[in-house]
Image (cartoon, rainbow, N blue to C red):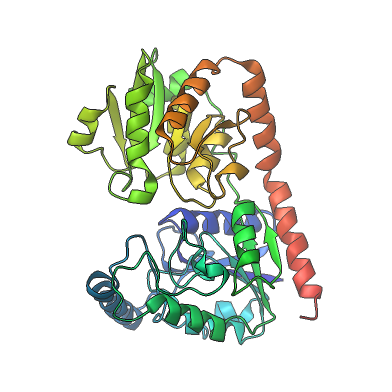
């Protein structure tokens, strides 16, 4: 059995990393698996790039056109992808030879809705591995308070340009090109996203399986905190709170404003802040009553694992998220997480077992979560429950087993 994963990249973005990890885990387990990408950043032989000179010219032309449409016509509040244009991959040998095709995150003008139809027309079993809500909407990646995807996306509240109803157009395109095919199946990492698919007007009648993302627990694991701190030059005697600032202060759905208010409210002695990703803007740093350490962007998993081990708490105040790799990584390193009770986060953050689930959009509740975790850092019952939960939930063997069962089910079906 040959498996092909399709993703815009193997390293750029959380969905790409999840796709790459799943492909690698399958190969390590003896499966025949490959990953087809637009942007290849690794040197792995099992990762194949579609990029050639002609493809590059076409792709960047499409990107430029979509950039102008988004900026001057649609003016999206959040990330939005129409997927009306893209490049061809159906002729690829890797796709023609595959028995099962996993379609991961294919936006950034990589594959169009029409190309997805061409893939389905091969009659191969196609599994959409959803990393956000895009597949079931008229183009937005998270609908937030909008539930139009349950009936029909139109007059999208996240698009400020209404010269044409692009959300309705894309929604109809997906309905026409994708819904008729019986060889289309879905995997979602979180129960929440699986429920969204079941309630969607587009794919509510399709077969859906909830399977968590895979993480390499040989890399992301618990190590000595003092050693980790010394390697980053972080103070040993302080309580350290970590968060990522990668577009976090400028992207409204990352929830920076709530985290900033929570940090101001906490006022706990001997606490310092650690930031990774983009450096925190000076004006934002001045508003936080704590010393801030910026470690910059970390491009390898070993450094990330060290950082999670160096801190006491990881905070992610996202207002919408499916199954964040950052939470997965932190928990694998036995670092408790504080996050809002939203999206797929409750699948990972079990309240007072693996971290603290704060009330949605409540800075006060976020602050209470920080205080609760800091008070329980030496609580053996809490630490043991976190280790046990993550040991079972993050088991690579169990996760691959679920994929195997699902693949066998769809291959044996007559649909």
Residue shown at 49% from the left, 78% from the top: 171
Residue 403: give x, y in percent of width and height. Answer: 71, 59
Image: 258 above or below 215: above
Image quadrant in which the N terminus is located: bottom right
| Residue 6 appears in the rendering | no
Q: Quadrant of the C terminus?
A: bottom right
User: In this orientation, which residue lies closer to the viewer: 184 or 301?
Assistant: 184
Q: On the image, which quarter does residue 287 sit in?
A: top left
Quadrant of res 169: bottom left
Q: Residue at x 43, y 56 (%)?
A: 11
Image position, residue 231 (x, y; %):
38, 25
Left or right: 80 with respect to 387? Answer: left
Total number of numbered discs in the rendering: 0
Q: Position of residue 274 (x, y in %)?
A: 35, 29
- Give the residue at the far left of this rendering: 283
Reply above or below: 254 against 312.
Answer: below
| Image location (x, y in percent) of residue 125 | 68, 76
Kindly indicate the quadrant of the structure image that contains residue 67.
Answer: bottom left
Query: Camera-side residue: 100 or 258?
Result: 258
Q: Relative to residue 55, is residue 289 drawn left or right?
A: left
Q: Residue at (79%, 68%) from the top-left corner?
A: 409
Rendered view: 88 above or below 379: below
Residue 357 visible in the current orientation:
yes
Above-or-below relation of 115 to 223: below
């Amino acid at each position: 059995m040959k498996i092909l994963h399709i993703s815009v990249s193997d390293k750029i973005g959380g969905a790409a990393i999840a796709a790459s990890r799943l492909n690698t885990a399958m190969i390590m387990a003896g499966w025949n698996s490959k990953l087809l990408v637009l942007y290849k950043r690794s040197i792995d032989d099992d990762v194949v790039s579609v990029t050639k000179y002609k493809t590059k010219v076409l792709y960047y032309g499409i990107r430029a056109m979509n950039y102008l449409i988004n900026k001057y016509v649609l003016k999206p509040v959040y990330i939005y992808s129409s997927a009306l244009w893209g490049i061809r991959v159906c002729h690829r040998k890797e796709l023609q030879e595959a028995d099962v095709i996993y379609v991961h995150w294919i936006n950034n003008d990589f594959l169009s809705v029409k190309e997805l139809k061409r893939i389905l027309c091969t009659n191969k079993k196609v599994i959409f591995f959803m990393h956000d809500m895009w597949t079931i909407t008229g183009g937005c990646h998270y609908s937030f308070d909008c539930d139009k995807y349950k009936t029909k996306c139109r007059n999208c509240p996240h698009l400020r340009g209404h010269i044409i109803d692009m959300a309705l157009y894309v929604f109809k395109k997906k309905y026409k090109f994708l819904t008729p095919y019986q060889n289309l199946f879905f995997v979602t990492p979180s129960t929440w996203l699986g429920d969204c698919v079941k309630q969607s007007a587009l794919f509510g009648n399709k077969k859906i399986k909830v399977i968590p993302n895979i993480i390499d627990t040989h890399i992301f694991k618990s190590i000595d905190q003092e050693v980790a701190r010394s390697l980053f030059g972080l103070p040993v005697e302080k309580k350290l709170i970590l968060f990522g600032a990668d577009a976090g202060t400028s992207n409204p759905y990352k929830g920076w404003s709530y985290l900033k208010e929570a940090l101001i409210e906490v006022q706990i002695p001997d606490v310092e802040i650690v930031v990774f990703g983009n450096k925190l803007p000076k004006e934002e740093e001045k508003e936080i009553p704590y010393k801030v350490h910026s470690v910059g962007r970390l491009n390898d998993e070993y450094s990330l694992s060290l950082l999670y081990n160096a801190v006491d708490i990881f905070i992610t105040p996202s207002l919408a998220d499916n199954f964040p790799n950052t939470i997965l990584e932190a928990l694998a390193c036995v670092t408790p997480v504080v996050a809002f009770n939203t999206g797929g986060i409750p699948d990972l953050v079990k309240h007072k077992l693996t971290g603290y689930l704060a009330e949605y959009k409540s800075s006060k509740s976020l602050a209470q979560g920080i205080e609760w975790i800091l008070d329980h850092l030496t609580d053996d019952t809490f630490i043991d429950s976190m280790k046990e939960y993550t040991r079972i939930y993050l088991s690579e063997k169990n996760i691959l087993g679920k994929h195997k069962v699902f693949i066998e089910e769809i291959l044996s079906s007559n649909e």
